[in-house]
Amino acid sequence: MPTPAPPAIEVCNLTKHYGSHAVVQDVSFALAPGETLVLLGPSGCGKTTLLRMLNRLVEPDAGSVSVNGADVRQQRPEELRRGMGYVIQQVGLLPHYTVAENVAVVPRLLGHAPDRIAARTGELLRRLHLPPEQFAGQYPRQLSGGQQQRVGLARALAADPPIVLLDEPFGALDPLTRASIRREFRELPELRRKTLVLVTHDVTEAFELADRILLLEAGRVQQLGTPRQLLLHPANSFVRRFFAAEQLGLQLRTLRLTDMLAELPPAAEIPDATTFKSEDNTVALTATVQEVLEQLSRLTAAGPAAAGDATVWLEATPPAAREPLTYASLMAAFGRAIQRLSAP
């Protein structure tokens, strides 16, 4: 029987003090290859310190970090960091380097061939909506904040590291640019096979990007789990309070129609291929409740306020199972599903 692969990252009892102040206290977790973990919590809870201990920018007082089964203390820090992408809020582009030269920094240090570096740089810039013929020769001062952040991400990915660490990568951007880059980030093929650890204090950002969330408070883990687990089954009163202000919006974005089959009309089993359809528009059964609400709103000329007058259709096999779904019936089903899924 083959030996199972080690975790991409394993953290055991990690602790860090500054003077008498415990910044990170006894933190443990393991990440599978390709998993995205978001470190979430209020300002000063230890998120960034924990992230920086993963690539030895900060050394722990106790505990250990292993990458692919190897203790990071057995590696030279600079070699460890070259094998990890690292993206920070301030971007940190070299001002006297062009965009292409900034992206190529780590591949050059690793001795990659110039033609390979040029091809990789062009590929990443195109994927991040920075056409190389327009942007490769520009300098950081000539770029907008969003463009600089894209270059920083391209630089982190240039050597194709299996692990990427991101410290508030979108925090300095305006809300519209931030939302746009988050969408690009989620859809970037380069990231789908990488292990990501991302620091944020933005709850919506965490729920959009995370496979799992590690919620910290005063350096201690309050809960580790999927966004859905933290939302529907909070481990303690802190977790409950932390999400309370945005609870409804998060529930609408987290719950999918597949979670509500028992509550949706008709009560009979619905095939996986079922969709909600109206005219030329289609919403898959895997859509979130929020996506269906947006679909209902788009079906009315008057906008969201008139969404209650719109109807989409639940189509199943056989055709006789076809039932209308309105705003009222959707929200009633949503309420019943939340009660059922939140039950102990």
Image (spheres, grey):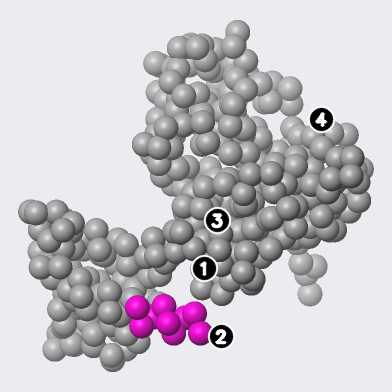
- Dot 2: few (<14), some (14–19), or many (≥20) neighbours within 10 Å? few
Q: Marks 1 and 2, how far apart in space?
A: 13 Å
Amino acid of disc 2: Pro
User: Which residue is found at the position 66% from the left and 21% from the top?
Assistant: 105
Q: Is residue 297 left or right of residue 87?
A: left
Which region shows up in magenta? 335-344
The crowd level at tag 4 (other Cα within 10 Å; few <14, some 14-19, many 20+) is few
Residue at position x 43%, y 20% in the image: 144
Are discs 3 and 2 less than 8 Å apart at CB? no
Q: Main structural element of the magenta stretch: helix, strand or loop?
A: helix
- Report the mark closest to the observer, 3 or 1: 1
Residue 298 position, x and y percent, is: 16, 56
Please give the residue where the numbered disc 2 appears in the rendered image.
344
Q: CA distance from mark 4 to mark 3?
A: 28 Å
- Which amino acid, mark 3? Ala
Sequence-earlier tag: 1 or 2: 1
Q: Which residue is mark 1?
A: 231
Secondary structure state at the residue bearing disc 2: loop
Answer with mark 3 or mark 2, whichever residue precedes in sequence. 3
Residue 272 visible in this rendered orientation of the protein: no
Q: For the C terminus, which image quadrant?
A: bottom right
Question: For the residues carrying marks 3 and 2, which lies nearer the camera in this image?
Answer: 2
Query: Label 4 belongs to which residue?
Result: 78
Which residue is tagged 3? 210
Q: Position of residue 116 (x, y in %)?
A: 60, 25
Please say if the residues under marks 4 and 3 sit with CB atoms less than 8 Å apart. no
Q: Residue sitting at 10 percent across and 64 percent down?
A: 279
Q: Position of residue 265 (x, y in %)?
A: 23, 85
Looking at marks 2 and 4 on the same chain, the residue that comes earlier in the sequence is marked by: 4
Compute the Cα span from label 1 to label 4: 39 Å
